[in-house]
């Protein structure tokens, strides 16, 4: 059972697939990307006072290779990623090409490990199970880690995209054999019964400590190393929780660890090279149906993927394939700062990263848009329309002017003020301005005509924006004083003591007005600390 908050729109298809939701229970901890000024080109660094963001549009999900393709398509140097892979020194290399996915041109990044191309788990599984005579009678499910086990035997760990397994020592007493290398399966003749001794084991895995050591030796920035290790640890933690074991017992099988290391380390290096302040993400289309894994058939999204996507908004468009892989989910968990529909931004460049499959009627790509974030209207700012009344007065008794101002405010004016002006024939006068609601305009216009000497009143409509405000009361030594406090997004921007409260106290207690106002301000500031 998945505990989640429903989203504003359901995202359900006619087949009632995975709903639009935000997976809850545990907060998603993410960090702000750091830019290495030694390796990031100057033109890619954040401009002073402006936030540069990258928006990840996961309308067709996300995998590690799709993310790398989008990075390259958005301007990250492919040579940078190739040098990173070479520096890992784990027998892998990249193949970068241009492809189309349902008419959309995109960059495809393929990882080759010891001559083998990384494939989605079902495609890899089907390729290897085709070597057996009858796949229904003797299938050998495994995934990107080329894990080999007998289908009729219970499996202890769900090995997902780049897959992780417990070492054989952890399986003792469970009646489970440890995985065989891929070559064992590929070398078997068609219809071979695989009558071998189940007691032998093959430890072709890398634990997290070994992976941390490998990444620690790579010639990349310290921030990129930390990010890559954090992504690996997120993957391991998700698997450990699903299978109720310790994270250090999770092993990444030899080939799967190579694929994962390339995707994850290149993702960390490439994200840093973008030179953005934060990566923002759309809701993720997780796909649907089921996926064949090393220990059987699982629903989409797979358990580890769902664990990694806690606190992220997800949905299914009805595509019956796994669209978000565990590596893609881990990248989102550790690189993405927040989730939102397409943000307000000034677009600089856009990149498309292709997935392996080419769906009919569905572009299997992820889009990465880079640019400058534009300020958004805060929820604490209210916009409305008011009426402005104006009249020029050059022959009104000054004593009357003050009385008119008081009457206007009493009758509902939002504000009223006078500005000294030099009028025709060089006569000094006053410009009377009144702000009011539209429904009060006629009443206040009549008051201006009856109480002043003007022969005309101008009227116009104007839009205004006002900050959210609240009243806060402080207790001075002479009595209570209210303060008007304005804020934006929870941050106080303005505060001032109410004049009438201070004036009344000053008059009643025979103390200086400024002393009352100063004490009220000091009490409020002390409270804020």
Image (cartoon, rainbow, N blue to C red):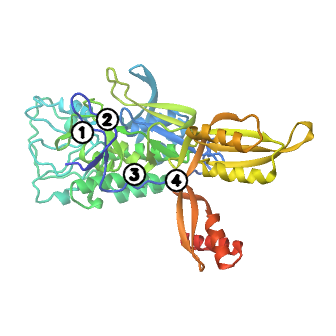
Query: In the rendered structure, which disc, 4 or 2, sits on the residue that comes first in sequence?
Result: 2
Badge 4 marks a residue whose secondary structure is loop
- In the picture shown, does residue 201 fall above or below 74? below
Q: State how far apart marks 1 and 3 are (Cα).
A: 21 Å
What label does residue 362 carry, if any? Answer: none
Residue 522: image quadrant is bottom right
Which residue carries the number 1 mark? 300
Which mark is in front, 3 or 2? 2
- In the picture shown, does residue 351 fall above or below 306? above
Which residue carries the number 4 mark? 489
Which mark is in front, 3 or 4? 4
**Residue drawn 76% across and 38% down?**
454
Q: State how far apart marks 4 and 2 are (Cα).
A: 35 Å
Query: In the rendered structure, which disc, 3 or 2, sits on the residue that comes first in sequence?
Result: 3
Which residue carries the number 2 mark? 323
**Residue drawn 39% across and 40% down?**
64
């Amino acid at each position: 059972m998945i505990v989640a908050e429903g989203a504003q729109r359901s995202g359900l298809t006619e087949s009632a697939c995975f709903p639009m939701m935000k997976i809850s229970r545990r907060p998603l901890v993410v960090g702000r990307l750091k830019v290495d000024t030694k390796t990031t080109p100057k033109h890619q660094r954040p401009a002073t006072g402006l936030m540069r963001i990258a928006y990840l549009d996961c309308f067709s999900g996300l995998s590690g290779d799709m993310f790398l393709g989008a990075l390259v398509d958005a301007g990250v140097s492919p040579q940078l990623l190739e040098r990173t892979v070479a520096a890992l020194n784990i027998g892998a290399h990249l193949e970068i090409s241009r492809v189309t996915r349902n008419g959309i041109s995109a960059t495809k990044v393929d990882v080759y490990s010891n001559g083998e191309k990384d494939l989605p788990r079902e495609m890899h599984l089907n390729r290897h199970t085709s070597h057996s005579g009858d796949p229904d009678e003797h299938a050998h499910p495994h995934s990107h880690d080329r894990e080999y086990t007998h289908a009729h035997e219970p499996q202890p760990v769900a090995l997902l995209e780049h897959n992780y397994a417990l070492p054989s020592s952890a399986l003792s007493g469970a009646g489970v054999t440890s995985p065989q290398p891929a070559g064992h399966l590929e070398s078997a003749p068609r219809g071979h019964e695989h009558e071998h001794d189940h007691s032998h084991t093959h430890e072709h895995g890398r634990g997290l400590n070994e992976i941390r050591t490998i990444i620690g030796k790579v010639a990349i920035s310290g921030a990129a190393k930390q990010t890559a290790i954090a992504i690996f640890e997120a993957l391991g933690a998700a698997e450990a929780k699903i299978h109720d074991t310790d994270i250090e017992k999770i092993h990444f099988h030899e080939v799967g660890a190579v694929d994962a290391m390339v995707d994850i380390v290149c993702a960390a290096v490439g994200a840093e090279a973008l030179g953005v302040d934060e990566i923002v993400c759309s809701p993720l289309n997780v796909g649907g149906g089921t996926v064949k894994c090393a220990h059987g058939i699982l629903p989409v999204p797979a358990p580890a993927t769902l664990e990694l996507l806690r606190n992220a908004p997800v949905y299914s468009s009805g595509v019956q394939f796994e669209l978000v892989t565990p590596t893609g989910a881990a990248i989102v968990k550790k690189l993405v700062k927040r989730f939102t529909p397409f943000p307000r931004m000034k677009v600089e460049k856009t990149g498309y990263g292709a997935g392996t499959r080419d769906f009919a009627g569905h572009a299997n790509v992820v889009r990465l848009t880079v640019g400058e974030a534009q300020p958004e209207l805060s929820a604490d700012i209210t916009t409305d329309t008011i009426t402005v009344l104006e009249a020029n007065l050059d022959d009104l008794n000054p004593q009357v002017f003050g009385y008119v101002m008081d009457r206007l405010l009493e009758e509902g004016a939002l504000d009223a003020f006078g500005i000294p002006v030099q009028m025709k024939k060089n006569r000094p006068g006053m410009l009377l301005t009144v702000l009011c609601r539209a429904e009060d305009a006629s009443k206040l216009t009549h008051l201006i005509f009856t109480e002043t000497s003007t022969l005309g009143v101008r009227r116009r409509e104007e839009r205004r924006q006002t900050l959210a405000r609240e009243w806060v009361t402080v207790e001075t030594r002479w009595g209570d004083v209210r303060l008007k406090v304005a804020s934006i997004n929870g941050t106080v921007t303005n505060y001032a003591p109410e004049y009438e409260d201070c004036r009344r106290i000053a008059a009643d207690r025979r103390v200086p007005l400024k002393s009352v106002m100063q004490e009220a301000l000091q009490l409020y500031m002390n409270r804020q600390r």
